[in-house]
Image: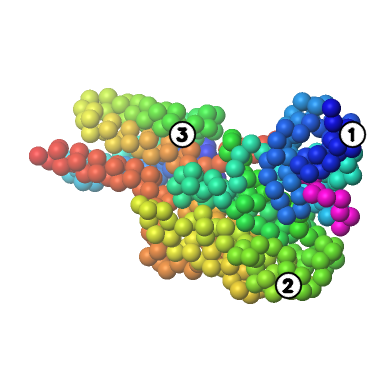
Amino acid sequence: MSKVLLGFLVGGALGVLDGMTSWFTPEVRPEILQIIAGSTFKGLVAGLLIGLFARRTNNMALTLVFGVIVAGFFAYLVAASMGKFYFEIMLPGAIVGLLTGYATQRYGHGPSPRAA
Amino acid sequence: MLSDAALDRLQTSLGTPDTSGTRYRILRKAGEGGMGTVWEAEDTVLSRRVALKVLAVEDEGGAARLLREARIVAGLEHPGIVPVHDAGTLPDGRVFAALKFVDGAPLSAALPMLGGPAERLRVFLRAAEAVAFAHARGVVHRDLKPENVMLGAFGEVLVVDWGVAAVRGDSGSRAFPVSGSGTKDGTVVGTPGWMAPEQERGEISRVDARSDVFALGRLLSVLAEPRPGEPGLDRRLAAIVAKATAQEPETRYENAAALAGDVARHLEGEPVSAYREGPVERLARLAVRHRVALLLLLAYLVTRALVLFIRKN
């Protein structure tokens, strides 16, 4: 699977998982569907960007750093929109970026070489 | 002053080949083989060192074998096979072959210097890939052993001494029987302890790529043998060795490529054809193979649980 598609799918899957964990917070449980949808969208976009970066650099360490920054930034936007829970949202979000970056670089395939 | 005749006699007695009038200048003796002596020499035209394999005496049979070896190697252009640059007859009548000079040591001597099991398996893989290339070109080495695998100073792994190699017959099968080697049934070709059983019995007509697989299996068992402090031999690897060194050629890997494929899969943590694993073993192998991803996933779940725990308290 290409790195871009893999980043997109892993980011989306982890976004769904991340959104579903809000079920354990009773005060936000009524809005769980919106949270899952938002978290999935965030994961898809972050995963896509990480996949594009992974394809361009082909470097595990740089992809991990980029994953943490991108996913952390999106998590920051969510926390900022709520005005609270910065630590609770950004820390797991950054780990999701790390995981997406690792999976994309480790399991994804680069573009096939073109014939001269 | 010595007369020319006296010089000739001295040269012969010392065994130093006469390279006068050729592009080669002898530097030192590099080794002794079954067919002759290998000399480190300088190619004065290209200013590079070469290994000059020279027959011990004027010997028509030996000369034909050396030229045959040179032709076989010339047809095997592969990074894991020492290339031959030249072949011919020296002024003293002895036949020679000029090969790339490998600055290194045979595996038999370099083995203690090699690192952990993965590094040793990678060395094996590179030797097996070179033999696989030869098999694909219809050549069987017939004398694979640690002395015939050279490790270069820059990590090169080269299969050398194709002096008793045999070429493909007309059967066209992948595990081809050998022919064109000039060897008749009943002749034992190879080194005791490394030969396949059919080779030891002199069953030349049964010697094929699977005979090399047997020798490679022996080589693998030497390289994979756990050293003090290393974990015991992995079951999958033990199964690969057992399949490669099976007594009957029919139960071995078909050729070196099939053996190398299984070793490569073992290194990558993938299932191997020689070993049928149970569900628990399969899960354990997958967990080891994807341990980093699993650890990151675990780190995420633990962080999430910690965040929830902190928030509730």
Q: CA distance from mark 2 to mark 3?
A: 54 Å
Q: Quadrant of the N terminus of chain B?
A: top right
Residue A40, by quadrant, is top left
What residue would you read off at disc 3?
A: A60
Q: Amino acid at mark 1?
A: Asp
Front position in the image: B307 or B146? B146
Of tags 1 and 2, the one toward the viewer is 1
Do the residues at pointers 1 and 2 share their chain? yes
**Marks 2/3 same chain:** no
Nearer-the-camera pick, A63 or B40 = B40
Colouring scheme, one of rainbow, by chain, secondary structure, one colour: rainbow
- Of discs 3 and 1, which sits in the foreground? 1
Residue type at mark 2? Answer: Gly
SS at circle 1: helix
- Residue at 68 percent across and 45 percent down: it is B31
What separation in Å lies between label 1 and label 2 (alpha carbons)? 47 Å
Residue B162 is left or right of residue A102, and the answer is right
Q: On the image, which quarter does residue B42 sit in?
A: top right
Q: Which residue is mark 2?
A: B202
- Assess whether residue B170 is covered by the magenta stretch: no
What type is the residue that disc 3 sits on? Met
Quarter of the picture containing the C terminus of chain B is top left
Q: Position of residue B195 (x, y in %)?
A: 65, 65
Residue corresponding to mark 1:
B4
Residue A28 as seen in the image, left or right of residue B98: left
- How far from the left and from the top, in percent, is residue B236? 48, 62
Q: What segment is highlighted magenta in the picture?
A: B53-61
Q: Is residue B291 visible?
A: yes
Mark 1: few, some, or many residues within 10 Å (few <14, many ≥20)?
A: few
Q: Confirm whether residue A22 shows in the render.
A: no
Question: Residue at the location (49% across, 31% down)?
Answer: A59
